[in-house]
Amino acid sequence: MISYGRTVLDLAHELVDAYADVFSAPPWSEGEETIRQFSTRLQTDVRRPGFRMAFAQSATGVDGFATAWLTPSPFPQHRAYPQVAAQLGSDRVRELLVGALEIDELAVRAYARGRGTGRALLAEITEDAPQGRAWLLTSRLARDTVATYRRLGWHEVPALPGTQTGVVVFLSPDHPGRPG
């Protein structure tokens, strides 16, 4: 199910609980402060242009969710954006990412993995990406996550020589700028 804008805040408590469950475990091992920051970010993220959230729900609550919005111009300079800009270069950032749908979070609880939940969330949230242009990033250390995105048909954007950082940038299967 897709929700837009402030209606997402009706599920805020359940989303924070799911976020904490997923990202406090390895390889992320996020602490209470990062989880609190997600809760605060959610309050402002819902106001971003193009914001939307897809979520999967069962009798136990939110099993997983994905949040996304349109990447603004100029390209942001906070969080992991400088790492992305450093390894792709400004021309590729502008061509591939600016104006595209940016998947900010994808969280699937452990009990809901292996059932197609993540695949369904990504498909739903990217269904109406502008000209099929969607992207996400993940930690290079999250090997299982990187392998999952590859298996789902997402394409890694190679880093410029000598610029590899701790993040991996992926383009959606339908992104017109995907590598080879």
Image (cartoon, grey):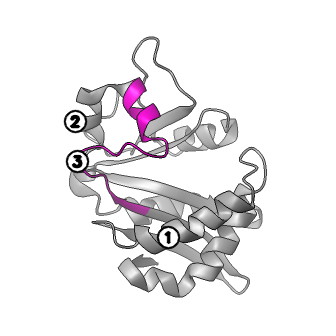
Identify the secondary structure beneath mark 3. Answer: loop
Residue drawn at point x = 23 percent, y = 50 percent = 99
Query: What residue would you read off at disc 1?
Result: 42
Query: What residue would you read off at disc 2?
Result: 95
Separation (CA) of disc 2 from disc 1: 27 Å
Q: Badge 3: few (under 14), some or many (20 or more) residues near its Cα, within 10 Å?
A: few
Query: What residue would you read off at disc 3?
Result: 73
N-term-proximal mark, 1 vs 3 = 1
Residue drawn at point x = 21 percent, y = 52 percent = 131
- x, y percent for residue 104: 47, 55
Identify the secondary structure beneath mark 1. Answer: helix
- x, y percent for residue 179: 35, 28
Q: How many marks?
A: 3
Q: Nearer the viewer, mark 2 or mark 1?
A: 1
Q: Amino acid at mark 2?
A: Glu
Q: Badge 2: few (under 14), some or many (20 or more) residues near its Cα, within 10 Å?
A: few
Q: Which residues are magenta?
A: 68-87
The answer to whether residue 116 of the structure is visible from this angle is no
Whether 177 is among the magenta residues is no
